[in-house]
Amino acid sequence: MKKLASISKHILLFLFIFSVTLITSAQETEGTKKESAVEGGTEHFGSYKPNVGFKLVNTEFGDVNFKIYSYVRYLNQLGLNATYTDSFGQTSDIDRRQDIQLNKLNIQFLGWFLNPKFRYLFYVWTNNTAQGLGSQVVVGGNLTYAFIKNFTLGVGINALPGVRSTEGSFPFWLTLDNRLMADEFFRPSYTTGIWAKGEVVRKLKYSVMLGNNLSQLGVDAGQLDDGLNTFSAALICFPTTGEYGLNSNFGDFEGHQKVATRIGLHFTRSDEDRQGQPRTDAFENVQIRLSDGNVIFEPNLFGDGIQMERATYHMGCFDIGAKYRGFALEAEFYWRLINNLTGRGVDSLNINEFNDNGYQVQGSGMIIPKLLQLYATWSKIFGEYGDPWEFRAGLNCYPWKNHVVRANAEYIYQDKCPVGGLSLPYAVGGTGSIFHINFQVNF
């Protein structure tokens, strides 16, 4: 691990020196062709571009765009069983909810400064369902510099590209601001780090990132280890049309007249410890969980006096999808290995590693082009501590025939769900029916 950390530090030093060199050389051409390089072309002060927001400032030295993402949710979990018994025989109550919440609010300021290739994104992100918790409000952002088409370098807070939903497709999903059960169980999350992305050749893109841990939201700097050993990468191919819709979105809102396809490969590795994992009530509830929902770092989970302290997370993901004339069929497959288990009393257990795999399938169709969309999904996990599954059916309505405003209604049936949180419509251990209605704006 020390060797990996040393290599990571040398890579970061090289990228820093490389960045400074290129930025310095680019200063000679600052101010040239700015108008064509700015997203949206000749946008002026007070103009609006869907999903980019309103332009507040537009000068020769940079611009500022303002946008908001938010939604209201009615949630009904009364169809869930009142209790849940895990694989260790422990029974717990399910806190079933029925409420109306302004579930999330994300206020963003984004644009470029000094050079159109030098871009920034800063935001305030709050989850009202978590009011009173320490990680209720997140203030973050990142800086990127597009050196060439094949290489953009970024630093700050970003999503580890370990699954399709963390590639940058949010919020253009079939579901509204929540992932299917298998995706939520296996995925990495947001952390602070350095990344590079770009186009290898036409129709083939890459993304790589070095970060602090799997999920830094809800974790302070003092709880992180000093390894800088979280690595995630993605390689995405678009074999037919060379694209897959806005931000490689789920479903065929655009109504492709030629078959659009994508194939994605993802890998993530991270050394995690008990301190560096978010609490179960954290804003982004990403945990290393068993397939029965228990967090592996829970004290006395595997016996009295036994405390798991450290583990290494490996996760591979493969996704494939096709779109044609408003219809889409998309699938994702996951393989996860948790090993290098250490902690008090762990040597006494006959456990060396945890192996889990799973998949999800999503089918959708635009019943009325750019207005009404129906979808159905299936999600399944094959784990050492249970095999939970999930089915969904939902309807999306886009009243202005764009991605800016959306109404969503969804029915979920889950069996022993291993993930959940206050911001999500499902709860850990839930078995039964869930219904929720959402109204979203993303301008």
Image (spheres, grey):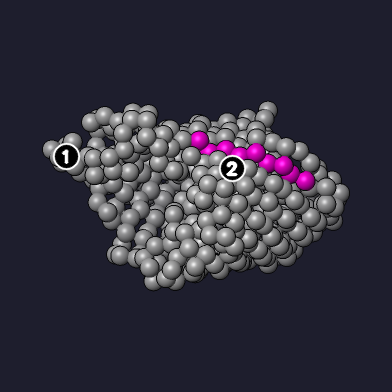
Residue drawn at 38 percent across, 45 percent down: 194
The three-letter code of the residue at mark 1 reads Thr
The chief SS type of the magenta part is: strand
Residue 75 within the segment the image draws in magenta: yes
Residue 198, quarter of the rendered image: bottom left
Q: Which mark is residue 32?
A: 1
84 or 150: which is nearer to us? 150
Spatial CA span between label 1 and label 2 = 39 Å
The percent position of residue 202, horizontal first and vertical second, equals: 30, 65
Residue 361 within the segment the image draws in magenta: no
- From which residue to which does the magenta span run? 68-76
| CA neighbours of label 2 inside 10 A, class few (<14), some (14 to 19), many (20+) | many
- In the image, taking residue 117 as reference, residue 409 lies left or right, namely right
Residue drawn at 63 percent across, 61 percent down: 375
- In the image, taking residue 440 as reference, residue 51 lies left or right, namely left
The percent position of residue 237, horizontal first and vertical second, equals: 40, 66
Residue drawn at 73 percent across, 56 percent down: 412
- The nearer-to-camera label among 1 and 2 is 2
Q: Which residue is mark 2?
A: 440
- In the image, taking residue 111 as reference, residue 232 lies left or right, namely right
